[in-house]
Amino acid sequence: MTNDEMNRVLANPDHIIMSDGLELSLGELDVTEYLELDSNLLICELLSVKRNLNLNSWEFHLIVPGLTFQDFVSFDRAIFRHGDLSFLLIDKFEFIKDSSIISARATRINKENE
């Protein structure tokens, strides 16, 4: 790829055509993310994540459209699912109503423990 082609692609990323072979080599591009509050499933979007190696935990910030204050305060178990990965939200919960953002610390759930 020449510099002119590279600059054109970087200037207009919405108009890139990707071959099927390249898509497969990059892995799954569309990953389903949802928040499971007890038996209720809410589609969400991962905003950011931090890993704490000392505590072997993660801190997630999720956008959860449609999440209400009632939903947030009345669940017993919360799980964030990102494709095949699952995380149990354990503490440090925060809910920002106007932006539908939820923050929480979580631990990863191994498939054997589900």
Image (cartoon, rainbow, N blue to C red):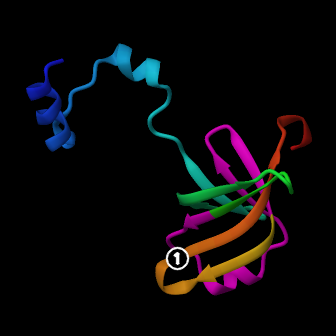
**Picture quadrant of residue 59:** bottom right
Left/right placement of residue 93 relative to residue 114 reads: left
Q: Position of residue 65 (x, y in %)?
A: 50, 70
Q: Is residue 38 above or below residue 21?
A: below
Name, please, the residue furthest toward the front.
Answer: 3
The answer to whether one can see residue 97 in this image is yes
Q: Position of residue 111 (x, y in %)?
A: 83, 36
Q: Is label 1 in a helix, a strand or a loop?
A: loop
Name, please, the residue furthest toward the left.
Answer: 4
Q: Is residue 65 above or below residue 41?
A: below
Name, please, the residue furthest toward the right.
Answer: 113
Q: Is residue 24 above or below residue 58?
A: above
**Picture quadrant of residue 73:** bottom right
- The residue lying at 39 percent from left, 23 percent from top is 23
Report which residue position mark 1 lands on: 100
In magenta stretch: residue 103: no
Q: Position of residue 11 (x, y in %)?
A: 14, 43
Viewer-side residue, 92 vs 38: 92
- The residue lying at 80 percent from left, 50 percent from top is 53
Quadrant for the C terminus in the image? top right
The answer to whether one can see residue 12 in this image is no
Q: Position of residue 67 (x, y in %)?
A: 58, 75
In magenta stretch: residue 78: yes
Left/right placement of residue 69 relative to residue 58 reads: left
Q: Which residues are magenta?
A: 61-89
Viewer-side residue, 82 vs 5: 5
Viewer-side residue, 75 vs 28: 28
Q: Residue flagged by tag 1: what amino acid is it?
A: Ser
**Picture quadrant of residue 93:** bottom right
- The residue lying at 52 percent from left, 74 percent from top is 66
